[in-house]
Image (cartoon, rainbow, N blue to C red):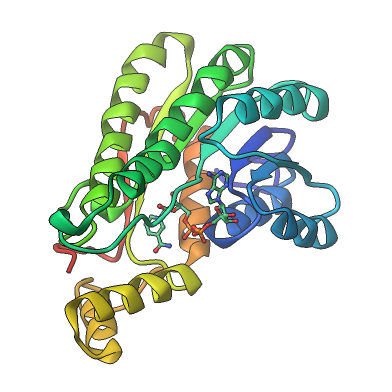
Amino acid sequence: MWNDNSLAGKRVLVTAGADGIGLEITRAFAQAGASVLVCDVQGASLERLAAELPAVHGCRADVSGEADVAALFETVDRTLGGLDVLVNNAGVAGPTGGVETLALADWERTLAVNITGQFLCTRLAVPRLRRGNNAAIVNLSSAAGHLGMPGRSVYSASKWAVIGFTKSLALELGADGIRVNAILPGAVDGPRIRAVIAAKAEALGKPLEEVTRAYTSQAALGRMVTARDIANMVLFASSDLAANVTGQELVVDGLTQALS
Ligand SMILES: NC(=O)c1ccc[n+]([C@@H]2O[C@H](COP(=O)([O-])OP(=O)(O)OC[C@H]3O[C@@H](n4cnc5c(N)ncnc54)[C@H](O)[C@@H]3O)[C@@H](O)[C@H]2O)c1
């Protein structure tokens, strides 16, 4: 049964945990008594986090950079003294537009953060997780990781890649007792989704209200999800309540059948 100690003492790394959904995940782990290290590319966000949650460790790192990730895991050893949970949360929205309008640099940058970043962090996390306590990896995918998303092809491709990575790792690491799951959020209310909707409205030449309505009406529940909804699922997937859950697509999207 879930109780206040369900995550107490867990050593957790949250990538891109200083803002957006990652910040809510960080808050949830900290409230649950876990020891948390957060990395982020934005120094200002890390400073705000330090003021809000002084017990949480912070480290500046870009998950797509091999040297940054190596330094990050030295910080993991120094501050947490081991690792039980890796949350591969870092991800960028990528460019919006028809495939023929996309620049190679934008395509490559999106893949570099959204999937290569998960690879770089996981590669260094696994030896530590093997020595960990009921270890788990949670990878942030998206509803666009099991549906197509017109105008966001590289984002969708990167999030489908997360699913293949997750299922392969679950098979590879099952014998070590390491569970690996993906979380597929629908549209999460917040500044990022508003920027995505604004970019889409501009690309389609449609009014902002119409595109916003399309985003909310595409879920059976008729609303966006919250960052807290995603943090709740991350906590569950990281806890011993999910002891036999691995290789799964954990969808938190109010039942979204298509993305526009
Ligand atoms: N917001 C949504 O509606 C939504 C929906 C589905 C999936 N997701 C996924 O959830 C995750 C978090 O999304 P979000 O909306 O909170 O993102 P966000 O754009 O709000 O960014 C959150 C944080 O990521 C950091 N960051 C960006 N690039 C980084 C990098 N290379 N290395 C380290 N940190 C980096 C930023 O500095 C920021 O602090 C992403 O993987 C995203 O694709 C988001």
Taking 220 as reference, is 40 left or right?
right
| Residue 84 shows in the view | no
Q: Position of residue 142 (x, y in %)?
A: 32, 51
Q: Say which residue appears at 41% left-offset and 14% top-offset.
A: 173
Q: Is residue 212 above or below residue 97?
A: below
How far from the left and from the top, in percent, is residue 25?
A: 59, 52
Quadrant location of the C terminus?
Answer: bottom left
26 lies above or below 123: below
Q: Quadrant of residue 130?
A: top right
- Where does residue 151 sit, x and y in percent of width and height? 19, 62
In the depicted structure, whether residue 117 falls above or below residue 33: above
Pick the front one: 168 or 176 = 168
Q: Nearer the viewer, residue 237 or 64?
A: 64
Closer-to-camera residue (220/60): 60
- For this view, does 127 lie left or right of residue 186? right
- Report the side of 128 relative to 250 (left or right): right
Q: Which picture quadrant has residue 59?
A: top right
Task: Report x, y in % for residue 212.
Answer: 29, 82
Image quadrant for the N terminus?
top right
Picture residue at 24% right of the left edge, 58% below the top: 152
